[in-house]
Amino acid sequence: MELMKKLFTNCACPAGRLGKLMLKFMNVSHGPLTNWGLDCVSIDNCWTMLDIGCGGGATIQRLLKRSKGGVVYGIDISEESVRKACSLNASLLDKRVFIRQGSAEQLPYDDRQFDLVTAVETIYFWPNLAHCLQEVHRVLKPHGRFAVIVEAVENDSVWTNVVEGMIVYTPEQIKQYLSEAGFTDIQVYRKGASDATIVGIKP
């Protein structure tokens, strides 16, 4: 049990040998959820997109496949994640892919820079969620979209007993947070008992 806690706590900020293992695991295991979640968003060609908590970089690849000529920025608090994401996307790095280390609390991007921002399995670990969502709102263009994709949707999720520092929000709570941050036309999509995608639009 203790080893499992150490492994899955690396979800928040992958580091070291266990972090590398976790990034490989997440790149594969999050695939079905991410693909379904991105299908809930009408992604156009040539969009400028940001993936917050980009992890091992697989979501960046999935975004590029959906936007011919698009550009994707990735940011993650983990140095190990940034290294892995850069390696996975090496052929497009500094061309259509731009990755850096940083936090959702203080996004190092210009106002109104992105058409789409995604957060896949990551808002559980964002400190001061309300402030982070205001940052997302700031960097989105008018009519830009923010997609939150999660698979833990119950406040009493068993995952919070395994992953230290993890906070699970219900889709309804996320919707309320988005509304308070200024997002409109918020849609909640559900798949099965757990998977959820919540999409808000910046007016």
Image (tube, rainbow, N blue to C red):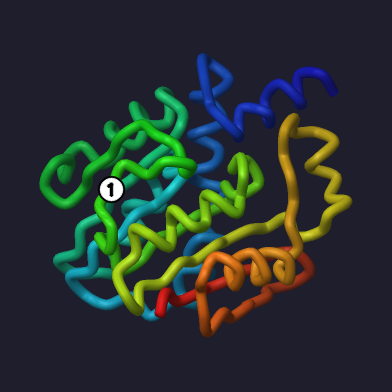
Q: Residue furthest bottom?
A: 185
Q: Residue furthest top?
A: 16
Please name the residue shown 52% across and 80% down the image: 184
In this view, the residue in front, 67 or 115, is 115
Q: Assign the N terminus to one quadrant of the image.
A: top right
Amino acid at circle 1: Tyr
Q: Residue furthest left?
A: 95
Please name the residue shown 35% across and 66% down the image: 116
- Near mark 1 (Cα within 10 A), the count class, few <14, some 14-19 or many ≥20, is some
Is 115 left, or right, of 146 in this rendering?
A: left
What percent of the width, then of the height, locates residue 58? 40, 48
Q: Secondary structure at mark 1?
A: loop
Q: Residue furthest right?
A: 156
What percent of the width, then of the height, locates residue 199? 52, 73
Residue designated by label 1: 109
Q: Assign the C terminus to one quadrant of the image.
A: bottom left
Q: Quick check: can you spot residue 197?
A: no
Please name the residue shown 42% across and 44% down the image: 54
Is 39 left, or right, of 26 in this rendering?
A: left
Q: Quick check: can you spot residue 117?
A: yes
What percent of the width, then of the height, locates residue 159? 79, 42
Please name the residue shown 35% across and 79% down the image: 143
Is 139 left, or right, of 186 in this rendering?
A: left
Query: Where is 94 relative to 155, above or below?
Result: above
Is 134 left, or right, of 141 in this rendering?
A: right
In this view, the residue in front, 125 or 133, is 133
Query: Where is 10 relative to 167, above or below?
Result: above
